[in-house]
């Protein structure tokens, strides 16, 4: 419901949400896919054909030769790190502004996360900061296409190649994102990682994929790592190196296969609605939406010039909330490096390993741009393919009202 009364909330009904069917395109196709698996009696990928078919279909969609399906986005990143095969204490450069799933696999694999700072107007790793962090122990860079905004992966790939390290793209939030060269996110680095968790552009509840163009050795290690390093293609029952079971189930794969034909429409609808909001709020002082070029809008981030806007994301989120619109200042509660797991090295027993020597560095001040965004320079508006134009106009009206309250 919409009202123009200045004192009453702009929305009294909730916006479509990724948390339920209102904001998801899930229906008869997914049900049919699940029935197909259940009635086959083949629920595991070692006996059924859904997971291998999903890998082939997602590979064709991305234009890559190698896809390894797995159980989550976090496990996809663990597969990628394990494929790089760091020695204990080797370093992997990444961001403090992401889901923890970007970083925890580094530590699980006994490597050390090194945090580079982000661009203040995109929240994405700044290539200069990455290059400055490279040492002779660096083995990889994990860059996140945050909120579906394209990361500068062409530059990062050039830096990675020059230093002989692997570039991993975290595309959990970036299905359909197009990079500066027009490539699909995930295809410029050596490896790309995706998530099928509930809130992503497409979902199977949980699930993940590692993709690779032209890196058969890395892809093979990732595939083995997802399956106890058991080389099933050789008919041997051997275990070639230390790894776990991160297999995707046939149920997840069947749902993902039903979701894939919907993906382009979901991205197009998210983009169209995001362009509408970007235009509608262009004149609001101090509020700078994400760059639209190539962005696939997992969420709608706004980067704030707090002096011009009259405040940071906190008063804006509060004003939006009073108008029935959800907004999250900062996206995450603290930089990833300040979480107890890293800052206090809560890892294996009391050892602190592999962070024993470094966790003191995970202190405030390490990445000033990252911290300023999390402290409030960033305001994140939930985004959805099922928003109507009226929904978008309500969000714009709520932002305008917030600006009128706060910026003057
Ligand atoms: C950028 C990013 N990386 C990694 C993950 C981890 O994915 P999952 O929740 O599927 O383990 C997520 C989201 O959940 C994410 O948004």
Image: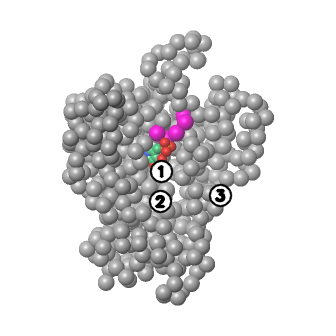
Residue 329 vs residue 24, the one in the foreground: 329
56 relative to 99, above or below: above
Relative placement, left or right, of 108 versus 213 is left
**Circle 2 Cα neighbour tier, 10 Å, few/some/many (<14 / 14–19 / ≥20):** many
Q: CA distance from mark 1 to mark 2?
A: 8 Å
Mark 2 or mark 3, earlier in chain:
3
- Which marked residue is nearer to the observer: mark 2 or mark 3? 3
Q: CA distance from mark 1 to mark 3?
A: 19 Å
162 relative to 16, above or below: above
Query: Could you tell me if the residues under marks 1 and 2 are in contact, i.e. CB atoms within 8 Å?
Result: yes
Circle 3: element type = helix
Extreme residue toward the right, this view: 39
Residue in the image at 45% along x and 54% along y: 148
Residue in the image at 36% along x and 55% along y: 333
Q: Position of residue 46 (x, y in %)?
A: 64, 24
The quadrant of the image that shows the C terminus is bottom left
Q: Position of residue 160 (x, y in %)?
A: 31, 37
The residue to which callout 2 is attached is 299
Question: Would residue 381 be visible to someone looking at this image?
Answer: yes
Relative placement, left or right, of 406 versus 223 is left
Circle 1: element type = loop
The residue to which callout 3 is attached is 21
Mark 1 or mark 3, earlier in chain:
3
What residue range appears in magenta? 70-74
**Circle 1 Cα neighbour tier, 10 Å, few/some/many (<14 / 14–19 / ≥20):** many
The residue to which callout 1 is attached is 173
């Amino acid at each position: 419901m919409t009202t123009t009364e200045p004192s009453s909330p702009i929305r009294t009904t909730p916006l479509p949400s990724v948390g339920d069917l209102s904001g998801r395109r899930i229906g008869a196709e997914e049900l049919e896919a699940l029935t197909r698996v259940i009635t086959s009696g083949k629920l595991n990928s070692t006996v059924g054909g859904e997971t291998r078919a999903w890998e082939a279909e997602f590979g064709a969609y991305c234009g890559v030769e190698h896809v390894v399906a797995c159980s989550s986005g976090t496990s996809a990143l663990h597969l990628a790190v394990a494929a790089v095969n760091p020695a204990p204490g080797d370093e992997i450069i990444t961001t403090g502004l992401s889901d923890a799933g970007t970083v925890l696999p580094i530590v699980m694999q006994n490597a050390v996360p090194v945090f580079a700072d982000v661009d203040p107007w995109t929240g994405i790793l700044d290539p200069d900061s990455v290059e400055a962090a490279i040492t002779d122990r660096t083995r990889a860079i994990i860059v996140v296409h945050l909120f579906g905004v394209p990361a500068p992966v062409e530059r990062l790939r050039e830096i990675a190649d020059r230093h002989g390290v692997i570039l991993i793209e975290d595309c959990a939030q970036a299905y359909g994102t197009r990079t500066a060269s027009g490539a699909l996110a995930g295809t410029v680095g050596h490896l790309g990682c995706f998530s099928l968790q509930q809130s992503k552009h497409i979902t199977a509840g949980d699930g993940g994929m590692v993709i690779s163009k032209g890196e058969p050795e890395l892809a093979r290690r990732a595939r083995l790592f997802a399956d106890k390093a058991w080389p099933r293609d050789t008919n041997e029952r051997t275990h070639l190196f230390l790894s776990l079971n991160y297999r995707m189930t046939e149920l997840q794969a069947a749902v993902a296969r039903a979701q894939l034909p919907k993906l382009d429409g979901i991205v197009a609808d998210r983009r169209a609605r995001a362009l509408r909001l970007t235009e509608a709020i262009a004149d609001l002082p101090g509020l700078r939406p994400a760059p639209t070029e190539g962005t696939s809008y997992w969420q709608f981030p706004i980067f704030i010039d707090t002096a011009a806007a009259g405040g940071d994301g906190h008063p804006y989120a509060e004003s939006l909330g009073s108008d029935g619109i959800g907004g999250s200042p900062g996206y995450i509660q603290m930089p990833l490096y300040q979480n107890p797991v890293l800052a206090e090295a809560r890892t294996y027993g009391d050892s602190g390993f592999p962070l024993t020597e470094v966790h003191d560095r995970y202190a405030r001040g390490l990445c000033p741009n990252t911290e300023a965004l999390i402290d409030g320079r960033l305001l994140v508006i939930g985004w959805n393919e099922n928003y109507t134009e009226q929904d978008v106009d309500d969000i714009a009206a709520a932002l305008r009202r917030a600006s009128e309250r706060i910026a003057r």
